[in-house]
Amino acid sequence: MDAVTSPLRSLPLGAVLALAACSGSTPAAETPSSSSAPSPSAAESSTSTQAQGPSECVSSVSEAMTPEQRAGQLLMVALTPQMGQDGLDAQLADGLGNMLYLGGWEGRSRVAEASAHLQEGAPTVDGTTIGMLIAADQEGGEVQQLTGEGFSTIPSGVEQGGLGSEELIASALTWGNELGAAGVNVNLAPTADTVPEEIGKSNAPIGQYGRQYGSTPAAAGQGAASFAAGMHAAGVMPTAKHFPGIGRITGNTDATAEGITDEEASTDDPHLAPFATVIKAAPTLVMVGSARYPQIDEANQAPFSEAIVTDLLREQLGFDGVVITDDVGVAKAVADVPVAERATRFLAAGGDIVLTADATQTATMQGAIVDRAKGDEEFAGKVEDSLTRVLTLKESMGLLRCG
């Protein structure tokens, strides 16, 4: 089987800059006060990936899929260099629809070879291949999973934020082209979190490593939007993270369940504005972080909160694209939640793709989705909605073609 490739091609830089200008782009180095950042609304930031309903292709493929295939499209599993060919094939045998390079991959040729193998093994339904979302976490600075030959050393978010918009868009276009040449079609970046200056490096997940684009919502949004615009122009889907913002917490959700509560965040929080800015600037995924926001939902962490995923992100901000978790496989922040429930609760909240850094959890998560959908009509409807969003995204990227 031929590898599935995306028809998205790099746009000329002039066209990219014109798009950025249309979205109200200003130099990323400018840092207006947080009070100047508007409170986002659906009217300002709507992204319409399926406003007209699913296409005939998406509908026909969805109807023909087995429950296991459907669940597989709603998972993204980490692939490390140590897994080798057998590891690749084992994941493909489970009918997974999405993979993430993790663990430090070196050299474009090695990554490109693995990407081609993944696409060759992508699931087929009634003769139609559903290509894979192949992701990398390629922010820059301390967070760059792909290195070596063929990959630039990308500066940190703080350093990128010091560039003008045009320079950052052009740089992101270059970095995106490098990912595309390696068969990567999704980047789990940019960071749209705002880290206030008074918190700075006390913010363990972002500020400590200089991952933020600025200390105000306006600066954070402009830098993230420029990065996203360059990535998308290269044919790589960006991912705005970590909604609704983890710039004010002190604990790192990957490493602890302590210090991960943002007591200030609310539904009219200025820190939502960077996400609205990115959504407006370019087609994107949105990653939900794993922190707690008691003013929005006292009972549930963000990925398990309908108030955050559906009411805030989808309804208030008007985002109807694909929503993905941060890692819920090995992250300490969700360690007290059973593995199966990490998948089903996220989908029930309105999310679409469950990301796990632990490949041994695949069968548990996939089985949990299938089993709950069999006996829960409302949940089955959520699975159908999520599958439609994922397949619609893949169709827009050229990963799903009927006929």
Image: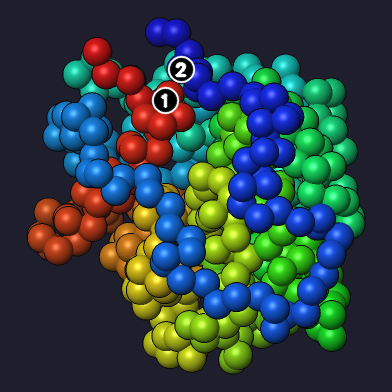
For mark 1, what is the residue? 399
Q: Check if mark 2's residue and mark 1's residue have beta carbons within 8 Å.
A: yes
Please tell me whether residue 279 is drawn above or below residue 19 in the rendered image. Answer: below
Circle 2 sits in a helix, a strand or a loop, which is it? loop
Task: From the top left corner, tell me how far across and down residue 189 is, in percent.
Answer: 65, 50
Please tell me whether residue 142 is drawn above or below residue 105 in the rendered image. Answer: below
Task: From the top left corner, tell me how far across and down residue 54 is, in percent.
Answer: 24, 39
Picture quadrant of residue 373? bottom left
Q: Could one spot residue 127 in this view of the protein?
A: yes
Type of the residue with mark 1: Leu
Circle 1 sits in a helix, a strand or a loop, which is it? loop
Residue at coordinates 67% horizontally, 38% vertically from top-left?
18
Residue at coordinates 23% horizontally, 57% vertically from top-left?
382
Q: Relative to residue 301, is residue 373 drawn left or right?
A: left
Q: Could one spot residue 90 in this view of the protein?
A: no
Please tell me whether residue 11 is drawn above or below residue 198 in the rendered image. Answer: above
Task: From the top left corner, tell me how far across and down residue 279 is, in percent.
Answer: 53, 55
Near mark 2 (Cα within 10 A), the count class, few <14, some 14-19 or many ≥20, is: many
Per the rendering, the mark at residue 4 is 2
Residue at coordinates 76% horizontally, 56% vertically from top-left?
26
Per the rendering, the mark at residue 111 is none
Mark 2 or mark 1, which has the lower sequence index? 2
In the foreground, 251 or 349: 349
Type of the residue with mark 2: Val
